[in-house]
Image: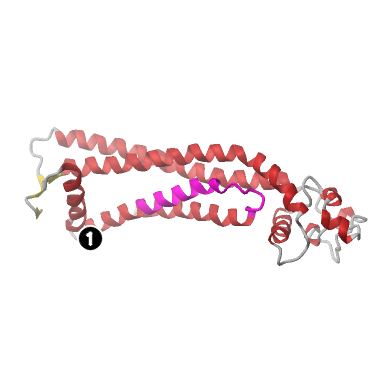
Amino acid sequence: MFLQAAAGILCYVGAYVFITYDDYEHFFEDVYTLIPAVIIIAVGTLLFVIGLVGCCATIRESRCGLAAAQELSAYTQGHGVLTVTDVHFQFVIILLLVFVTEVVVVVLGYIYRAKVEDEVDSSIHKVYDEYNGTNTDAPSRAIDYVQRQLHCCGIHNYSDWRTTRWFKESRNNSVPVSCCRPAVVNCTGSLARPGDLYPEGCEALVVKKLKEIMMYVIWAALTFASIQMLGMLCACVVLCRRGQDPAYELLVSGGTYA
């Protein structure tokens, strides 16, 4: 059950990154940022499969699990005899591969987290300049969504809208209504009433949000990597003790299951 729970959490974190990236993709165009999320979903899927095989082995008196392990042993060892030592060794190898993969996720997470600020700074001006105020325009929808969700207005503050093409063409001395505070009634976004608008700019808040998302991935990978390290140590201890046990028995021999 632990592996299924771990798989569920990892897949949830990875899916959350994908969903959030879809909302902020116009402000952060580097798609390689999704690599840690893809890897963590793959790890979660692998853990789910391992847990499913374990449950199958338990429910069906080890026949299903041992059959899968027997096939793996035949490929890796070139013979048809599977011992408890083989099972533990293969389990340690799988945990080691998953552990290394999660370490890679942590490293990539820190690398891409460090790039967030520069990426947002280089793209946010372009997105704001492309704003035209229509729902059919993707950059416009992205800006309105971010300003409403993060309670911000403009890049650094609402005065940044003065330099945008949309502001110059509209000539009404106002900003988008997505800059309006929700408590203000009949807000039109007029710069003559700055108290009706969000005072904080969006760039810093977008950077903060994206860094938080990457930290979710990093902490999830670190947590399960630590747990798997403990699991590998325990499996190695069991493996060493069983290897010295003279009463050690074969689980599968000559194609007959115990």
Residue 240 lies, in percent from the top left, at: 20, 33
Which residue is tagged 1?
59
Q: Is residue 238 left or right of residue 117?
A: left
- At a point 60% along the width and 37% down the height, the residue shown is 114
Magenta stretch containing residue 110, yes or no?
A: no
Residue 86 lies, in percent from the top left, at: 18, 42
Image vertical order of residue 184 relative to residue 225, above or below:
below
Magenta stretch containing residue 41, yes or no?
A: yes
Q: Is residue 230 left or right of residue 33?
A: left
- At a point 8% along the width and 39% down the height, the residue shown is 247
The magenta segment = 24-46
Residue 66 lies, in percent from the top left, at: 18, 53
Q: Amino acid at mark 1?
A: Ile
User: Is residue 254 visible in this depiction of the protein?
Assistant: yes
Q: Which quarter of the figure is the N terminus placed in? A: bottom left
The quarter of the picture where residue 236 lies is top left
Can you name the residue that lies furthest to the right here? 192
Q: Is residue 233 left or right of residue 107?
A: left
User: Is residue 196 visible in this depiction of the protein?
Assistant: no
Q: Secondary structure at mark 1?
A: helix
**Number of marks in the image?**
1
The foreground one among 16 and 76 is: 76
The foreground one among 107 and 243 is: 107
Image vertical order of residue 229 relative to residue 195, above or below:
above
- At a point 21% along the width and 37% down the height, the residue shown is 239
The quarter of the picture where residue 84 lies is top left
The foreground one among 215 and 247 is: 215
Coloring applied to the structure: secondary structure
Q: Main secondary structure of the magenta part?
A: helix
- At a point 90% along the width and 55% down the height, the residue shown is 191
Residue 208 lies, in percent from the top left, at: 66, 44
